[in-house]
Amino acid sequence: MTLKVPVGKAKKSGLRKLSSKDRIKTALETLTGRSRVRRTMWSRRAQEYEAKINSGDPVSIAEVVRDLHRATDQPEQSYSERQIYQAALERLARELAAVEKIDEVKATQKLEQVLKKAA
């Protein structure tokens, strides 16, 4: 798909440059870190997660993916946790796919492999 936006309105429209390979590398390293789930009400954490996803920063999005990822031996997520996790995973996979010039499915698989190794 091709989207044409006047250069003068690009920033106002929320468009930004693709992340650098170094920034993506940092995001992948973030996925391997320890989960930092704060003990606040879910509604407050959900708002913070949404803000991180909407920021567009791959490292912030990776923090959301890392914090909400569940291994097979962990308890199941609530519906809203799954929704936010999926949104963050998809956003990060699209960015990774664009930077590494691979398709989105391969990018998602790569992210899931990194998460499995970290578990």
Image (cartoon, rainbow, N blue to C red):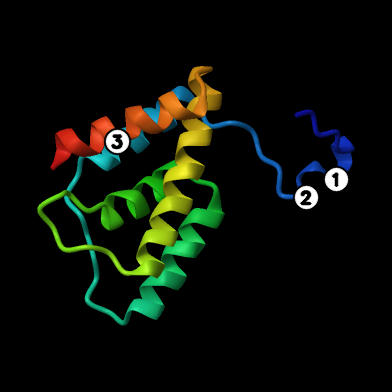
Q: How far separated are the C-alphas under marks 1 and 2?
A: 6 Å
Taking the image as shown, residue 32 lies to the left or right of residue 53, namely left
Residue 54 figure quarter: bottom right
Where does residue 93 sit, x and y in percent of width and height?
46, 35
Neighbour class for label 1 at 10 Å: few (<14), some, many (≥20)? Answer: few
Q: Which residue is mark 2?
A: 13
Look at the numbered discs 1 and 2 and tell me whether their residues touch, using CB distance below 8 Å. yes
Residue type indicated by callout 3: Glu
The kind of residue on which mark 1 rests is Lys
Q: Which badge, 1 or 3, is on the more N-terminal residue?
A: 1
Residue 36 in percent (x, y) is at 22, 60
Q: In which quadrant of the rendered image does the C terminus lie? A: top left
Q: Residue at x 22, y 76 (%)?
A: 39
| Cα distance in 3D space between marks 2 and 3 | 31 Å
What residue is shown with label 1?
A: 9
Q: Nearer the viewer, mark 2 or mark 3?
A: 3
Residue type at numbered disc 2: Ser
Query: Crowdedness of circle 2 by 10 Å Cα count: few (<14), some, many (20+)?
Result: few
